[in-house]
Amino acid sequence: SSQLLTRDTNSAYTPPWGQVAPAVGFQLVGLWVTGAVCFLLVHPLWESADLVPAGERQSPINIRWRDSVYDPGLKPLTISYDPTTCLHVWNNGYSFLVEFEDSTDKSVIEGGPLEHNYRLKQFHFHWGAIDAWGSEHTVDSKCYPAELHLVHWNAVKFENFEDAAQEENGLAVIGVFLKLGKHHKEVQKLVDTLPSIKHKDTLVEFGSFDPSCLMPTCPDYWTYSASLTTPPLSESVTWIIKKQPIEVAHDQLEQFRTLLFTSKGETEKRMVDNFRPLQPLMNRTVRSSFHHDYVLNMQAKPKPSTSQVTS
């Protein structure tokens, strides 16, 4: 389908950043292939970053369905978000973030592959210039047009988010794919705020929002240990990637693309293709919470084995 294409789809698309980077290193944001020419683009976020070129647990990755390993020990994921902890939405020059008050355990997740409660810090999205790509993770080399990340930190082991982000098992990120489909009422609440935060470093209050409404109904997920996908790329993340995408309308994704990487007064650069290229799996195992059959490279209907609890 049109919303699920390989990352290297042929395209005449002109990238938002005018420079072409060498095809090496970790400072790269997006990857496009036009004929035999590979464009790797540098966003200012990456230019002076303290990166981890020797990292062996980097994200995002391509999830190979048939290579994922069912783990019967994975617990149901329990999600408990308090809408009153939602604070504001702001444009940080790379995405738009919805941030939460995280001094208490009012908005937490537990279970799944996690040993402790993790507090919700913020959520944000990654998306493409067109609907053919945009997600950071891929499944069997297929892209979705966007990907939601809900970022949580381990408040049992660490005093604050900043400390947790530097240490193993410090963070837990839920990834949810977005695909083209019907209009999403709850996503529209976010879309309605975007004209107010068009430019970098603009912020608007955004209260009483429960992001569990952005979760798919299917509880199945993949999980693996890895890193943040933006600098400092710390290898502190337990990823929980939901198997089932949520649906959004094309016009809703188009509103994401009206945002700008740039501040007021600067030359406008559209906020698109804010994803990191795929990283090698190395020797890691991707575990799944569900049984699955893989026949002739086709995804058979899975047999759910876990439940998802929301409160």
Image (cartoon, rainbow, N blue to C red):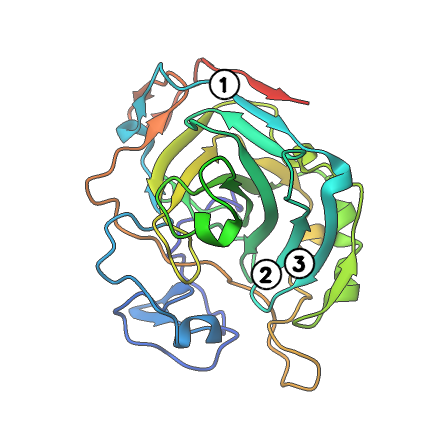
Q: Marks 3 and 2, how far apart in space?
A: 9 Å
Q: Kindly report which numbered mark, 1 or 2, lies closer to the viewer in this rendering.
A: 1
Q: Which amino acid does label 1 sit on?
A: Pro
Where residue 80 appears, as percent x and y from the top left, is 64, 28
Mark 3 surroundings within 10 Å by alpha-carbon count, few (fewer than 14), some (14 through 19), many (20 or more): many
| Residue at the (26%, 44%) spot, across then down | 281
Q: What element carries label 3?
A: helix
Q: Which amino acid does label 3 sit on?
A: Phe
Labels 1 and 2 touching (C-beta < 8 A): no
Q: Secondary structure under badge 1?
A: loop
Distance between the alpha carbons at the discs numbered 1 and 2 = 30 Å
* Horizontal and vertical percent position of residue 22: 28, 76
Q: In which quarter of the image is the C terminus?
A: top right
Kindly identify the amino acid type of the residue bearing the numbered disc 2: Ser
Mark 3 vs mark 2, foreground winner is 2
Q: Would residue 262 appear left or right of 8 to someone viewing this image? A: right
Question: Looking at the rendered structure, which numbered label has been put on residue 95?
Answer: 2
Q: Mark 3 to mark 1: distance in Å?
A: 32 Å
Q: Which residue is denoted by mark 1 in the rendering?
A: 76
Whether residue 265 is visible here, answered yes or no, is yes
Q: Give the number of the disc on residue 256.
A: 3
What label does residue 11 carry, if any?
Answer: none
Q: Nearer the viewer, residue 35 or 154?
A: 154
